[in-house]
Image (cartoon, helix red, strand yellow):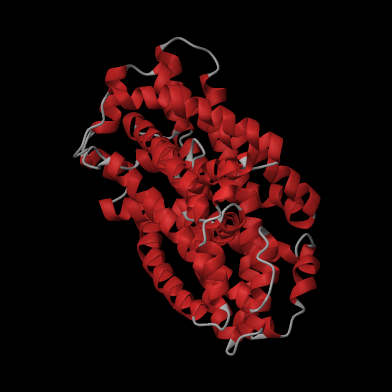
Amino acid sequence: MTKNDIKQRDGFTSKFGFLVSCIGAALGLGNIWMFPYKLGTYGGAAFLIPYLIFVSILSTTGLITEFSFGRFYKGGSYTGITTIFQKRNLKGGKIIGLLPALGITGIFMFYCVVIGWVLKYFALSISGKISSIDASTYFNDFSGTSSSIPWFLLAVLITLLVVHSGIAKGIEKLNKIALPILLVLFIILLIKSLSLDGAMKGVEYLITPRWTDLLNIKTWVMALGQAFFTVSLTGCGMVVYGSYINEDYDIPTSSLQTAFFDTLAGLMASFIIIPAVFAFGLDPAGGPSLLFITIPKVFQSMPYSSLFSTIFFISIIFAAISSSVSMLEGPVETLLAATGLTRKKISTYVAIICFILGIPLAINTTMFIKFADFITIILSPLCVLFVSIIFFYFMSKKDILTAINQGSKRPVGSWFIFLGKYIFVPVTIIIIIFGIIYGGIG
């Protein structure tokens, strides 16, 4: 396919645009509330040893696989899977091909509910009300109620507006603007957090290696899960992004850069959040309580609380929306490939359906948790497994290396196929098993 063909289909206009879009897709709420918690809880600096091992091997392997699969077949998982099944005269290609899109659609639904919570707290920050709410009870009184529905809708609409505009004018343009701004905001918050009295206790908590934790299997399991899920491996989103690039793009280098900057963002978030939490003697708990209860308490204790709260939550919005657009693009691209409808119609229809189906998740916390657990623990990693098996076991060695090495300055050899077949695929199975055992590790 020529560059002109890529442009006709829409696609990324520059390598930088592709890179920041991939970083934006990878950099989500998981980096901001889960990475700091895991880093502090499972060994401090010692946690980085298993985490960096897994990121350098598994995350980059997964990214290379998904980008290459998408670029080689000039489409998302649905296009690649159905094409391979047809060539081999196998049945079930359309059903298996739809699963990754369904999985990422499920993520989009509950993810937008969470973005709605962030938007609400951003509004509280701008209005100054963040300083007067009872942070211990406000979140529980708001989330899981009908009051969250308008904010959930707003999250869907913002994402739709970007995806509606296409790849170059929507997703790429958003990330070229949002990611640099996010970096500046993170630097401002980092300086402020580290300047607080008592913040060094939080720094010590993060950088002091607790080597005995490396003897705990759970440390390695949590590092494995964080590394696997942090770069947004879903068997769909990154495949779709890969389908929008031409043969000049260096996929192995882009994958390494995505993993690196994603990790860097997680570390910055850690040194923003944890020192501030320690400065005010609060508990660095994980999950929503950290973002929506603990952090608001921190801001309430600061001078200019509304200002810094506004900066914090707008940075979270940038990170979250840059991820949600990749999630919505997954099913949109799939339906574009399977139907003759336009992008604007399909993106609108998908957004409406996701909003309607997501309302029960917005008003029922128990249903939200069960649904999110099923998608993230079982369905999404299963889709990664399906795509990786099809890529490494169904494609020829020649096609695999061609898919990966076009545009690469340092082409990979047959060793990468061995890595994919006998390490990445089995480890993905292990991740699913551990996820079920531990109730989630990502």
Image height of 348 relative to 132, above or below: above
Please tell me which residue lies in front, 245 or 394. 394
Q: Residue at x 57, y 70 (%)?
A: 202
Horizontal arrangement in the rendering, residue 267 relative to residue 70 (left or right) = right
Work out which residue is located at the far left of the displayed protein and give it. 409
| Position of residue 169 measured from the top left corner of the image (x, y, whole percent) | 36, 57
Q: Position of residue 62 (x, y in %)?
A: 43, 36
Q: Is residue 224 above or below residue 263?
A: above
- Residue at image point 66% right, 75% down: 296
**Which is nearer the eye, 140 or 266?**
266
Q: Residue at horizontal 51%, vertical 25%?
A: 426
Q: Is residue 274 above or below residue 77?
A: below
Which quadrant would residue 83 be assigned to in this image?
A: top left
* Residue 166 picture location, percent across and down: 40, 52
Q: Write the residue at 46% across / 47% down.
A: 49
Looking at the image, residue 29 sits to the left or right of residue 393; the answer is: right
Residue 386 image offset from top left, x and y in percent: 52, 26
Residue positioned most to the front: 212
* Depth order, front residue of 250/104: 250
Please say whether residue 313 is visible from this viewpoint: no
Residue 437, image quadrant:
top right
Quadrant of residue 382 within the rendered picture: top right
